[in-house]
Image: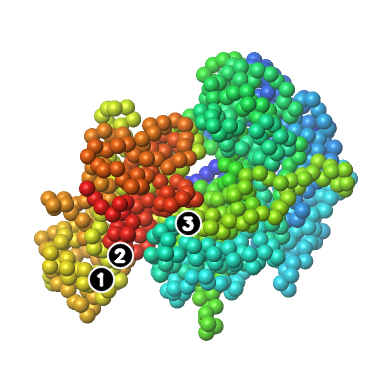
Amino acid sequence: MDAMADDFTDLVLFPHCDVHAVLDGAKPLTLKVFRRRRHESNPRRYRLDPNPVTDAVYEFMAPHRDPGKRFDGLPTVDPATGQVTATEPGVYLFQIRAGDDYIVGRLQVHNRIMNWWFGNNSITTALDPEIYHAQPTLYARFINEPTGTDLVGDITGHGYVALTPDHPDTVVVNEHGRLRGVAVTDPDGVHHPVSITGNYRDMVRSLAVRVVDYGKVRTDLDASLRNNVSQSSELQNILFLPEGFTDAEKTKFYEFAYRATDLIFDNATPRHEPYGLLREHFNVFNSFVPSEENGVTCGFRVTDRATGRVPTGLAIPFDMRVNSKKPKLYTMAALVARVGLPQRNEAREHLAELWNRQGLPDFDPTRVDGETVDAWKGLQCTGMLHVRDTVFGLVLGGRFADRASGKSTATNPAVVKPALDRSSEAMTRFIGRVYEFYTTALNRHLGFDPRRHPPELYANSRRPNPDNSVLRLAAGLKFKGESGTLYDIGKAWFFDDSVFQRSRGLVGLIVYDYLSGGTNMNGLTIAAQTVASKNRVVYEYGGPSDGIDPQRMFRKIPKFAEEPDGLADTIAHEFGHSFNLGDEYEEFDGDAPEYDLPWDNVTLYSSIRSNSPPPRAIDPAKVEWLKLPAILISSTLSADSQERNNGIEVNVGALDIGAWIFAQLRQFPVRLQNFDPRPNGRQFPFPTTPQQQLNGLVVVDNDVTRGTIVLGGSALPPRPFPTFKKGSAVFVPMQDGAGKEIPVVRKSVLKFLQEHRTPLNKNREHFHFSEEADVPVRIPGQRKPAQPSTMIGVFEGADHFAGAAYRPAGACKMRNSSARDDYSAFCFVCKWLIVNRIDPGFHALVRGMFYPEHNHD
């Protein structure tokens, strides 16, 4: 389905989802909910309805109060105007319902704002005739109160601070505090920033702004691997762009880009195969665009006090257990998702007992201990980190402020606030709904910062959002050949979701940051990866000498050890997503939920469940990768097939013709498979109609000079014969002595799966997540494999969950890209799928080189 032509709608809340009301303020807080939908005349964009929703339902609770009192003295919202009325300071969670859509958030009520400042040192926005892009971040310090509210909060877009452009001929501001570039600030190639001024009760601050034209034509495209630029649409074109590299690091960026290219396509080592074998099918380009500052924005706050094992500088909440030797305890992020965040200066005792009687929907007191509770109390930070000014505006992790809305469905029914705060199923469901606020993006997730990417162009990371600044810039890139000819390479990355494009998803952002971060984002169209892998933020407060406020908190980018080899490992993994391979690692306890899983290498229990015992039994016949054939001879059609009197003529090329003459002599059965991936690149299930697949053909003629063979025999369909397009596969499946086709899974493994209907994991634990490679159970009659984790079969634990999600092998690059030896290589199924997408003529070679243990039983 065309992802940009669907009936997408959601809710957008202004100012955002983590808001602050002030009792003694210059103006009241107003919440405005807009419905967003696909733009009617431009499906590459979104449109917010011109008027806010006025019939929304607002439901509050006070999570830090004792059960029975959580509905007392709550704020209210006038649905017609969105104006918030509050009577006492405190922390409140809320749900907003509008039809089948809902969005959750947090409101903190304070008595007074004592100070405010810009949360940016400078900001970059886009030249645009219509849309307002970047939004400056505004922080406030409130009067110190004993109510558990934060001392420093995010008042971006609240309207408390009046923003005025000092140069309205260059940049203008809308009512939500977003900036639109009217003229670029670098007409001569050097930026001349302008400024905006903010004023709250005569506290005046200024912010430098630069305006970039992301859509202009750029002719400085550099090639680190060039095979064919004149016919680039027939190749896979990779583009590396920088994020967080200033002009001073330009040389570093090119070193990283060239080093990553060399490592990924070095076929002297198997670590990243089959990229090396397929290197002639790739171009790799690089283009440098500088950022004002190093590093990227941290969406999360960080710990600013050490607590036991927990040091300063960790994300709030962090994605780890306090003690890694206790795998049955909650990770801190999992605990926060269930019980919320602590109050400022948290001092309550016996918290596990309190949580157990709060009616929380999924809290298990046996999964916390005293050390975990103490660490939870330490998830506090007085300040909020300044935003970094980078060219593309990426954010690491996510703010609680930047939540997406949800939908009520049959499996996720609407939740309505009960009349009373007392123990009941309705109360538990309501708590579970508003506590969704406490779940944010994983700490190492890189994505577009909604403060830099406007709601008209960016909805969420799961959607393609094709008009974002990265892809707009990529579309304008041209390559200048030696003769001076300009090649319009940029069109390779200007994707159309209604058709398959070979270069879709092969844009890579190399991020100059020492924190660990990596994601294939924006609907699998952009891969981003940092150049190092630390997990602690280095920061400093403004201190007594700060001219604005001592609670200002700045992120520092210290000197750090770069990891070019690790960068290549992760980029190779992230581009695996672009070939429709899903993550095979585990991060969450329990079973994966049932949803439409798009990957070819991962499946869910709901898709392969068996109707027979034992419990959790799987049906191997429903696992698509177990049907993949082992291939003896293979070629790729170099032209569309032609109809001949004696069959279908296909061009296999002069280099391959010898193998096909052998196939003719032995009368091997031949399969033709049309090259027809879906627009998103998904291959499973392979279409099997005669127009897409023909089986059991034989070679009846050949032409050595032209490199062609004619396929005929009794399996030919009636005339007219179907046409098999250039790039399609023709191959001879391997057969056993009885003439039965041999799949990529070994016969003994398939028999075991059919008899036992359970995954192969020797470790049967499927509730607590594991980061290790899995080894298979002992299979009767099979000698012990030399590399057991590379065996092809069905292993449980994938798509981030410990249970009810399955993958083909115990180890794979999609599970751990940085492991040693074969455990960091793509498993054989992933290799098979990548080869089939790029050049199926390599199937036989890849089987001979990389099939586990090089044999079948």
Q: Is residue 803 left or right of residue 108?
A: left
Q: Which of the marked residues, 1 or 3, is nearer the chain's N terminus?
A: 3
The Cα atoms of the two marked residues, 3 and 2, are separated by 22 Å
Identify the residue under disc 2. Answer: 841
Q: Which of these two is toward me, 758 or 34?
A: 758
Looking at the image, can residue 14 be seen?
A: no
Q: Position of residue 430 (x, y in %)?
A: 56, 25
Identify the residue under disc 3. Answer: 572
Element carrying mark 3: helix
Element carrying mark 2: helix
Would you call the spot at circle 2 few (<14 residues within 10 Å), some (14-19), or many (20 or more)? many
| Residue lying at 25% horizontally and 42% vertically, measured from the top left | 782
| Residue lying at 87% horizontally and 43% vertically, measured from the top left | 544
The Cα atoms of the two marked residues, 2 and 1, are separated by 9 Å
- Asked if the residue under mark 2 is in contact with the one under mark 3, i.e. CB atoms within 8 Å, the reply is no
Q: Amino acid at mark 2?
A: Gly
Q: Which of the marked residues, 3 or 2, is nearer the chain's N terminus?
A: 3
- Asked if the residue under mark 1 is in contact with the one under mark 2, i.e. CB atoms within 8 Å, the reply is yes
Q: Position of residue 145 (x, y in %)?
A: 81, 28
Q: Amino acid at mark 1?
A: Asp
Q: Which mark is residue 226?
A: none
Q: Is residue 737 above or below residue 658?
A: above
Q: Amino acid at mark 3?
A: Ala
Q: Position of residue 552 (x, y in %)?
A: 79, 44
Task: Specify the farthest residue to the left.
Answer: 714
Q: Position of residue 558 (x, y in %)?
A: 71, 53
